[in-house]
Amino acid sequence: MIPPEIFNQIHDKCTEGLALASASADDGAVMELRWCNKAFSRITGYDAAEALGQRGTILIGADLEQGVHLYIIEKLMKWENFSTEATNNRKNGETYWQRMSWTHLSDPATGDHWWLCSIIDLGNRGSGRAKESRPLVDPVDIDSYAKTLDKVQRLEKENARLHDLAKSVAKDANEDALTGLSNRRHFEVEVKTWIQGLKQHQKEFAVLYIDLDRFKFVNDTLGHDVGDRLLVSVAHMLRELTDEGDLVARLGGDEFAILRPLGNSALEISSLADEIVSRMQAPFMCEGKSTGCGTSIGVAIAKSNMQDPERVVADADEALYHAKEHGKGRWSFFTEEMHAKSIATKQLASDLLLACERQEFIPYFQPLVDARTGKIASAETLVRWAHPTRGILAPGAFLDTAQNMGILKRVDEIMFACLKDALSCFDKAGVDLPRLAVNVSAARLADPTFVHDIRSSGIAPERLTIEILESVYLDRIGEVVRWTIDELDELGVTIALDDFGTGHASVRGLLEIRPSILKIDRQFIQPVVEDASTRPLVASIIGIGKSLGMHIVAEGVETKEHARIVSEMGCDYLQGFHFGKPMSLEDLCSRLFDNGGVFWPEAVSVDPDRLLYVTG
């Protein structure tokens, strides 16, 4: 056996740059550097404090050929051992020729995956200058014993190197590189140990799941260095507030967790949560600048009478979600109601995936009436879910969950396919429906593929209106949203701004988007019958829209009097329950047949000369 004293010299004396990274089980290209030797720091320019905790991408310099970079990613993703020789950069940007080798390692006990990276500095080869010459070796008859000895020595050196790496990683494997707290892996191992103690010795304990509320804002505005300092400060604070018998861990990002024995009362647990929330409300100072962060905490208790104590961490996570959902900057104890809600949400998510496969989403239509003629001018399309057991569900029952799951695009695709069929159905039936309108969320409007989806839907652009919710925040639209709106306009699609007046848009935002149609939110329209003092505000909104050349839609028209008043005020189109609630394709077709497309016969009695809004 090689003496440990020999192993311990590898870190300092090995001339080959060595680094060890823990890898994601799902993707070999996703890794975190956990150990490196001195030669690694000398060759790359990154000392251990800078490298550890970083992604393996810090080893990819600006001058590394793109083809080599892609080759490295491909091999890592496939868990293949490989080597490359190419020009790369040190930390300071200096280029050099290197040989980089990657070896896949795995822990048979835990199943964890690791990468061993070897870097050799080959000097200035490949930089355009002549390669360095090497002295020739005269051919000699090498003794077979010497060959064997050399091979044995090389194998021993390799074994020693791997053994040294394993020893060096043993401590780091349980420790978060940035804060020095336990890492997620160690936390999960300890949770299992504490649960065993609960089952065998009734040692009850609490889990506090901690998440910083505004950490992304700190990172985005003050930089990642300040964000790292904040995380270190939080770790220091948690150490101060906890006891020696507690386990404090950083689970990753801005998430922390505490395991604490329950003792005689849960009062100590709530007091700890109170203190953490209170401390985090104080401003964080860095280089003379002050910023706030705040925290939310979920607390769950692992009790001896629990049927499933293994779910205690998940329970704490549910309580954390509840705390964030109810305002952040607070903490919540887990309750069984939270668990029931979580189960219902998971079931809903599962049903939504099946609904996408079975294309269970269908369109409902609400008429939009021309204020001068009383005839239908368009119909707003509203998604409904034809649930196999719960019947027809409105968007409020599932749309938020669908957005959180990232499947809104799929729902939109199903709806657009339905719209094409709906327009064909109306046309074949001989009923006149000039166009359809579709609501678009901020997320879909920022999706670069949205315009392509409309192009490929087969719907004639001149028969389509895209309604943009005012909550898209018109004053802060990005380049992708701006491009999408321009493309839609070029296609010939009509742009409408929905729910105007709810607080997000300004006149400057209107000038930026310049929609063809402005829809006044129902909360402004509904009071105009009973409260005449609300009419000047509506008239002002109509005036703004008209001055910008827009057509005005009044939403929330529920009575004949509503229709008469807003028409006289200058609204071009009317929408509301007075003309019909959202209805199925068959019901709308039937209504159009019955009334010949006229939803407001009284429109002809509205005298245009009585309009309260006067242009120019």
Image (cartoon, rainbow, N blue to C red):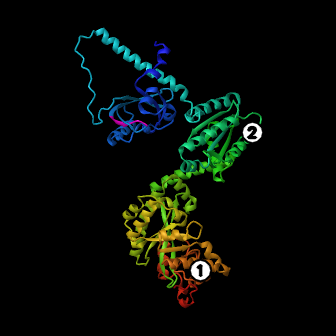
Query: Toward the viewer: 508 or 195?
Result: 508
Identify residue type, mark 1.
Ala
* Circle 2 residue: 266
Q: Position of residue 417 (x, y in %)?
A: 41, 63
**Mark 1 and mark 2 in contact (Cβ < 8 Å)?**
no
Q: Quadrant of residue 153?
A: top left
The numbered mark at residue 245 is none
The amino acid pointed to by label 2 is Ala
Q: Residues within 10 Å of mark 2 (few under 14, many from 20)?
A: few
Q: Secondary structure beneath disc 2?
A: loop
- The percent coordinates of residue 588 (x first, y second) are 49, 74
The relative height of residue 215 versus residue 161 in the rendered view (above or below) is below
- Residue 582 visible in this rendered orientation of the protein: no
| Left or right side of 248 for 415 | left
* Separation (CA) of disc 2 from disc 1: 59 Å
**Precedes in sequence: disc 2 or disc 1:** 2
In this view, the residue farthest toward the left is 139
Labels in figure, total:
2
Residue 6 image point, x, y percent: 47, 15
Q: Residue at 47%, 72% (x, y): give it.
A: 514
In front of the other: 229 or 501: 229
Which residue is under mark 1? 539
Structural crowding at the residue carrying mark 1, measured as other residues with C-alpha within 10 Å and reported as few (<14), some (14–19) or many (≥20): some
Task: State whether residue 615 appears in this view.
Answer: yes
Q: Nearer the viewer, mark 2 or mark 1?
A: 1
Q: Eyeballing the image, is 74 above or below 289?
A: above
Q: Is residue 88 magenta?
A: yes
Q: Secondary structure at mark 1?
A: helix
Of residue 38 and residue 274, the one placed in the foreground of this image is 38
The span shown in magenta is: 86-91
Name the residue at 57% across, 44% down: 226
In percent of width and height, residue 111 lies at 48, 30
